[in-house]
């Protein structure tokens, strides 16, 4: 066996992979060898806002602050191109508008159609009060109006069912 050769040893119900490297063997079982896709989900470095936090951002007083932010050079695009629904900054206006046509953005709009789950809903579901199912809303993409400083109104219309 040369450097980097492998051989499999059958000892009872377990299979050990023995790696030979520089004359020594490596006999440890590799339980979490294929978990890299799971580890990315556990990490918090690229964590985005939850849907209830985004729903809080969709209120009138928060929309104006988020769409008309001060220049911050630490954020992409100096914090001037922000998608409220996805909680993401973009480097340019064209990148933001091309994001509006992607599946990721459309899925987020679909996820925001249902009202977020609240503590009152959980109490009603537990038997303290009458439970009402969450209402569906129609949400359209919000953009900053460069012509006016007015606040764009989120179009939330209660839908049947």
Image (cartoon, rainbow, N blue to C red):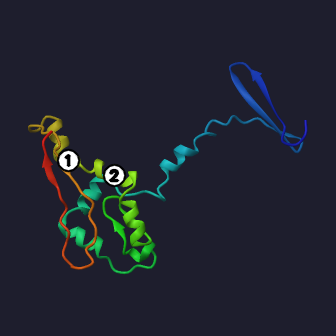
Vertical relation: 12 (above or below) 19: above
Measuring 42% from the left and 67% from the top, which residue is drawn there? Answer: 95
Instruction: Say which label, 2 or 1, has the lower sequence index.
Output: 2
Residue 80 x, y percent position in the rendering:
36, 75
Measuring 50% from the left and 53% from the top, which residue is drawn there? Answer: 43
Q: Is residue 82 left or right of residue 161?
A: right
Vertical relation: 88 (above or below) 72: above
- Depth check: 10 or 56 in front? 56
Specify the label residue 110 is tagged with: none
Residue 106 x, y percent position in the rendering:
33, 52
Foreground: disc 2 or disc 1: 2
- Depth check: 109 or 116 in front? 109
Measuring 55% from the left and 44% from the top, which residue is drawn there? Answer: 37
Q: Is residue 9 left or right of residue 54?
A: right
Vertical relation: 109 (above or below) 24: below
Find numbered disc 2 in the image and state the secondary structure of the residue it sits on: helix
Q: Are marks 2 and 1 in contact (CB under 8 Å)?
A: no
Specify the label residue 119 is tagged with: 1
Q: Is residue 34 left or right of residue 110?
A: right
Residue 143 x, y percent position in the rendering:
28, 67
Badge 2: how crowded within 10 Å, few (<14), some, or many (20+)?
Answer: some
Specify the label residue 106 is tagged with: 2
Most extreme residue toward the left, as rendered? 130
Which quarter of the rendered picture does the N terminus lie within?
top right
Q: CA distance from mark 2 to mark 1?
A: 27 Å
Residue 47 at least partly seen: yes
């Amino acid at each position: 066996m040369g450097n980097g050769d492998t051989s499999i040893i059958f000892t009872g119900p377990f299979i050990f992979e023995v790696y030979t490297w520089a004359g020594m063997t490596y006999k440890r079982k590799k339980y979490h060898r294929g978990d890299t896709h799971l580890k990315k989900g556990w990490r918090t470095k690229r964590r985005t806002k939850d849907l209830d936090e985004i729903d809080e951002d969709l209120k009138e007083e928060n929309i104006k602050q988020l769409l008309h932010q001060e220049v911050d050079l630490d954020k992409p695009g100096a914090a001037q191109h922000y998608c409220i629904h996805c909680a993401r900054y973009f480097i340019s206006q064209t990148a933001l508008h091309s994001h509006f046509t992607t599946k990721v953005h459309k899925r987020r709009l679909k996820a925001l159609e249902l009202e977020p789950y609240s503590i009152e809903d959980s109490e009603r579901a537990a038997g303290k009060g009458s439970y009402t199912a969450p209402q569906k809303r129609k949400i359209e993409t919000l953009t900053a109006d460069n012509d006016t400083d007015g606040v764009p109104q989120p179009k939330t219309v209660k839908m049947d069912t």
